[in-house]
Image (tube, rainbow, N blue to C red):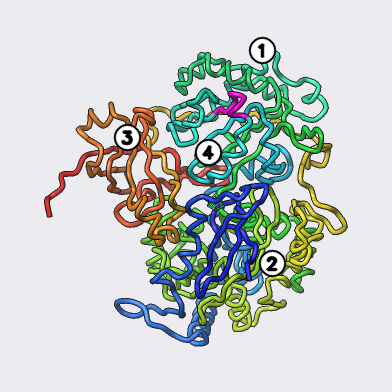
Amino acid sequence: MTRSSHCPYCALQCAMSLTPAGARIEVAGRDFPTNRGGLCKKGWTSAEVLDTTDRVTRPLRRVDGGFEEVSWAEALDDIARRLRDIRSSHGADAVGVFGGGGLTNEKAYQLGKFARIALGTSRIDYNGRFCMSSAAAAGNRAFGVDRGLPFPVEDLDDARTILLLGSNVAATMPPFIGHLAGARAAGGLVVVDPRRSETARLTEDGGGIHVQPAPGTDLVVLLGLTHVVLAEGLADSAYLAERTVGLDELRREVNRWWPERVQEVTGVPAAQLRQVARRLAEGRAFILTGRGVEQHVDGTDTATAAINLALVLGLPGRVEGGRAVSGYGTLTGQGNGQGGREHGQKADQLPGYRKITDPAAREHVASVWGVPPESIPGPGVPAVELLGMLGREVKALLVHGSNVVVSAPDAAAVTRALDELDLLVVCDFVPSETALLADYILPVTQWAEEEGTMTSLEGRVLRRRRAIDPPAEARSELWVMRELARRLDAPGTWSTDAAEVFDELARASAGGIADYSGLSHARLDEGVAAFWPYPAGSAGTPRLFEDRFAHPDGLARLVAVIPRLREPGAQRGGELTLVTGRLLEHYQSGAQTRRVPELVTARPEAALQIHPATASRLGIASGDLVEITSPRGVTRARAEVTSGIRHDTVFLPFHFPGAERANTLTEAAVDPVSAMPEFKRTLVSVARVEEVPA
Ligand code: SF4
């Protein structure tokens, strides 16, 4: 029977039909507002990973020189015994939990609960910290709520202008390009990227403008645009007066960023800044940010500056004829990057996007969990700090849906720290680079093999449905958590039924910012467009901010932000700035897509993009093997000489492990507000390597 589901990869959550064909399933695109039947090549080939030849199909225990198969009972008994020993020797916080933005809402919810009341640890965080936390922090402080797009994605179709900052959607989520068509036709797609990325190239047919600032200067570009809007009288004064606070301080800060000064810092011509600002002020404009401007030590402030610009222009919350005609949003990356940060796997949050420090929130969630509020630990530490504690304060780590050996900053240090643990347990379905370091690898079910829900980049809750049977010995992570909770004598109930877990999640979220209490699997199966907040008795909220923002007074906050420009020489490293990012063919750490033959054939290895003038100066030609060096290590890749990148910048995808691992080079420096790492600005040197003929 054909089942309706959604792609396992990115946050666009393209709709699919899954049809069993023997032991395999056939994937087809399904008409849906986000993808209109389209899929990218990752989506088309997604089912191939399910029967990859090295799929983990039985629990594996580390032995000398490799792994041996063990029974579930043996594995879980031993893991529970070792967790008890570690807790009694070092305290409950000596056990860490690392989740993932690809987990279903049900698993993310249960993982947060499991950490807090089965393990008793505060030390849980997840890989969404690497990709969404700065935009989330900026949204929370400006609007009082963090939902990636506060409007359905199809509202973008009628835009006249779209300012897209630091997002290469043409490679990362190709069906999304369809929603840029209106702006392109109107000559209003503005792409801000130091590279002439696939998305920046969409502007070349006269359909827009490519703004190419120096890496790490996006905040200054945004201050300059806001300066022009205010200086030229393009601001929406009535909107600012009625719907915002903080204009005076903002005006004082942006006054000092006139276009010619911005040009000096960023390399963006003053005339181009004025052109973009005037275009945005003509109406029907949207501003969208992505990881390119957010994965910096000033990522929260940069996203804040983008929101300030949108507010000064009066864009958010403007709805006409039932559609948002302008606005601000951020393009979430991972499949459940949105839902994953709403239900409790973030160090400082409880389900429903509640603060773990809020006594009322603790009381409400404790009543759902059937435990005393004081038994719920306080806030933990964010992901990079948690990884920095491995082998020291944290002796055991449980990993769900994450491959930190490839995806974490300063990955060589993380790899060494994982080796120092007394116990590493990884739930996965392939032997990822992180799983290969584990004491136990527990085989878990995947996307087309299970029921559940995901929440897309628009805050739309979606049903994932089981289309085929998993391998006989694979188990849902819900089952793994229940079995461990039982062995640890945990309080509360631990259902393995995704619909029941969703019902509990809905109760726990009731009254919170991300309220799912009006939803259930059955309700979603009716095909409702389920945008949160969706309190019981409501019809959900496709568009936020039409009447008020989520702060108690209903007003948005303009938050003045100041660039913390680094002095030349303040950061150690070489003369070139490395930007890391994604390719069309691969997803995140590549653990899944590197197992799909078609994708590997198309992109078998990392390539370093480098400008022709820089390459020539360094004696490098396309195809040469090069070494990229930062203070943290050395990575190798083939050179791809291209004029589509600034002469002072190089680009390396982060999907590849081992000698090609981009995150060997990156630094564990984080944004002070969001704790998000800086993946987009690493100083490196590049040199050609002599290859010895085989
Ligand atoms: Fe759609 Fe993203 Fe899946 Fe590609 S990876 S098919 S864009 S959801």
Q: Name the residue under label 1.
A: 232
Q: Which of marks 3 and 2 is nearer the N terminus?
A: 2
> Looking at the picture, how far across and down is residue 685, in whole percent?
29, 37
> Looking at the picture, how far across and down is residue 108, in whole percent?
63, 63
Q: Earlier in the sequence, mark 4 or mark 3?
A: 4
Of marks 3 and 2, the one in the foreground: 3
Q: Label 4 amino acid? A: Ser
Q: Which of marks 1 and 3 is nearer the N terminus?
A: 1
Q: Name the residue: 35% across, 56% down.
A: 657
Task: Check residue 4 for magenta coloring.
Answer: no
Q: Is residue 575 above or below residue 33?
A: above
Of marks 4 and 2, the one in the foreground: 4
Q: Where's the C terminus, which quadrant?
A: bottom left
Per the model, the C-alpha gap separating discs 4 and 1 is 28 Å
Of marks 1 and 3, the one in the foreground: 3
Q: Name the residue: 72% across, 70% down.
A: 499
Q: Label 1 amino acid? A: Glu
Q: Name the residue under label 2.
A: 376
Q: Name the residue under label 3.
A: 610
Name, please, the residue furthest toward the left: 693
Q: Mark 4 points at which residue?
A: 167
**How many residues crowd mark 3 within 10 Å: few (<14), some (14–19), many (20+)?**
many
Q: Label 2 amino acid? A: Ile
